[in-house]
Amino acid sequence: MAVVLEAVAVKPKSTLGIKVADAVWIATAFLHSSRPAQQAAFTIDEIVRKVMSLNLTEGSEKSIRQHVLQHCEALSRPQPNRSRMLYATRPTHRRLFRSGDRYHPGREGSPTHPDWNQLPSEYRHLRQWYETVWNKAPNPTEVSDPLLELAGTGPGMWGEGSADDYVNSLRSGWEASR
């Protein structure tokens, strides 16, 4: 009787010792910096595959996926991770968080990038790219609302009185013109 053994692909253990959240940030930054003009966001699968291919962490694929999907995503309710490293542009797409992006109030004051001192030397160039290119660029996914931009522009617009007095003064004489 012959015994058949199946070959099981075993992922080599990472020697970098990076936390899963930091590995997700590095992989996403790597994707952005290598093709900045072509893509504003990446699918969850693309980011997970990049983390796995760079062998950044010993975290499981399931853990990496959960970090991309929720733990690092700024708009999600924190449970338990509070970082704001990623921003969901669509339910299936993520990009790096930028200053000025909206986020869940429970994530206030949380990290938006890895501790720069813990970044492996081969990825230290990503800090400069992030600070000078990515985090300084205008946010393409945030559309300004022209009505909200008018907030606070009204006081003093109608002279000395209130807005009601101003409207009433405009309406005075309407009855006479009929």
Image (cartoon, rainbow, N blue to C red):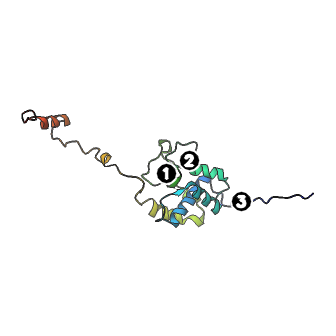
Tell me which amino acid carries mark 1. Answer: Arg
Residue to which mark 3 is pinned? 11
Q: Which mark is residue 90?
A: 1
First along the sequence among labels 3 and 1: 3
Task: Say whether residue 88 is visible.
Answer: no
Toward which corner of the image does residue 47 lie, by quadrant? bottom right
Relative to residue 156, is residue 25 depicted above or below?
below
Real-space Cα separation, disc 2 to disc 3, in angstroms: 24 Å
Real-space Cα separation, disc 1 to disc 2, in angstroms: 13 Å
First along the sequence among labels 1 and 2: 2
Q: Residue at x 57, y 64 (%)?
A: 123
Relative to residue 56, is residue 145 depicted above or below?
above
Crowd class of label 1 (few under 14; some 14 to 19; many from 20; radius 10 Å): few
Furthest residue toward left: 176
| Nearest the eye: 119 or 92 | 92
Secondary element type, mark 3: loop
Q: Residue at x 53, y 61 (%)?
A: 29
Percent across and percent down for residue 23 are: 60, 57
Residue to which mark 2 is pinned? 70
Relative to residue 150, is residue 115 depicted above or below?
below
Q: Residue at x 52, y 55 (%)?
A: 113
Tell me which amino acid carries mark 2. Answer: Gln
Real-space Cα separation, disc 3 to disc 1, in angstroms: 30 Å
Percent across and percent down for residue 102 are: 44, 48
First along the sequence among labels 2 and 3: 3
Quarter the C terminus occupies: top left
| Nearest the eye: 12 or 37 | 37
